[in-house]
Amino acid sequence: MPVDPATRYRTEGFPPQHQEQPGLTSRTEPRPDHGEESYVGHGRLQGYRALITGGDSGIGRATAIAFAREGADVAISYLPEEQEDAEDTARWIDRAGQRAVLLPGDARDEAYCTSLVSRTVDALGGLDVLVLNAAYQENRDSLEDLSTDELDRVFRTNLYGTVWIARAALPHLSAGSSIIVTSSIQAFNPSPQLIDYAMTKAAQVAFVKALAQQLGGRGIRVNAVAPGPIWTPLIPATNWPEKLPEFGQDTPLGRAGQPAELAPAYVYLASDAASYVSGAVLPVTGGKGL
């Protein structure tokens, strides 16, 4: 029987809370659903080898679990401070009978980004799907208060890291491979408190559309997922506890989404079912328009 999407998950907002960046799953209340108990695989990525940045928690973890249950071996990158979450994700990959590779480091470091790809290829024997998901955001009360150091942190994490990793991955990708970028509804409908984050997400859309044109002749597809308000550790780490009781309440479905609701989008875009999909931005927004 169909499930009512408006009531499938928590319909009210979230209790005020705050974490230091980057945020941990164990300290997020209530705990996000990554599909640990619900996602069922159907072999759609059997034999694939995937690298997911920011794969320790949130959307990245949900995607890692789904990929593993679809038959893929998965390498994940994450900040060293997120080791606890990364190890938990690895356990779910292991339980699916697939190989998990943990690669801690900072996406702001070009050398790390380059080595991330080569280490993944060495560990998994190749690379078929690259999910560029790692991101940083912080609440900005005004443009006057946005320091250059913080601007640099957002741009290097969300844009430079994306380009560096994709560039390093290209020699290892072949026809049938794909790149998936986690953009955001913020690319199209920006919040003033996330002005710099929204700028990077809009730039990612341009990156996806241009790169899809570059790589189409090689049989490599490039797409993006644009999440709406999704409950992950990044949200309580964004320094806006007063917004949490209303988080996601302005969507047509009337609630925030869960990471588990994003994973099928990544599976689809990575699989042969999306063989004619490239340069696309797939919204998963609870009905909010792009």
Image: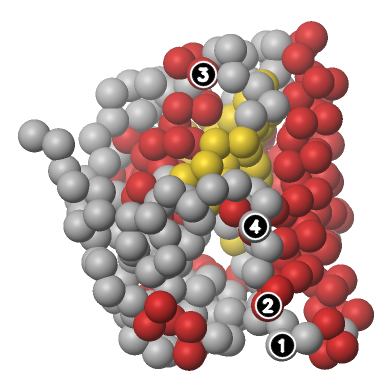
At a point 72% along the width and 65% down the height, the residue shown is 197
Circle nearer the viewer, 4 or 1: 4
Tell me whether circle 2 and circle 3 mark residues in contact (CB < 8 Å). Answer: no
Residue 26, relative to residue 95: is it above or below?
A: below
Residue type at mark 1: give it.
Asp
Q: Position of residue 21 (x, y in %)?
A: 60, 80
At a point 44% along the width and 31% down the height, the residue shown is 267
Residue type at mark 3: give it.
Ala
**On the rendered structure, is 89 left or right of 77?**
left
Residue 136, relative to residue 18: is it above or below?
A: above
| SS assignment at label 4 | loop
| SS assignment at label 2 | helix
Tell me whether circle 2 and circle 4 mark residues in contact (CB < 8 Å). Answer: no
Circle nearer the viewer, 1 or 3: 1
Tell me whether circle 1 and circle 2 mark residues in contact (CB < 8 Å). Answer: yes
Q: Earlier in the sequence, mark 4 or mark 1?
A: 1
Q: Earlier in the sequence, mark 1 or mark 3?
A: 1
Please rate how many residues cluster around mark 3, counting C-alpha atoms within 10 Å: few if below 14, some from 14 to 19, many from 20: few
Which residue was labeled with disc 3?
A: 274
Q: Position of residue 186 (x, y in %)?
A: 64, 58
Distance (Cα) linking label 1 and label 2: 6 Å
Residue type at mark 4: give it.
Asn
Say if residue 153 shows up in the picture.
Answer: yes
Distance (Cα) linking label 2 and label 4: 12 Å
Tag of residue 141 = 1
Please rate how many residues cluster around mark 2, counting C-alpha atoms within 10 Å: few if below 14, some from 14 to 19, many from 20: some
Q: Earlier in the sequence, mark 4 or mark 3?
A: 4
Foreground pick, 14 / 130: 14
Which residue was labeled with disc 2?
A: 193
| SS assignment at label 3 | helix
Tag of residue 189 = 4
Q: Earlier in the sequence, mark 1 or mark 2?
A: 1
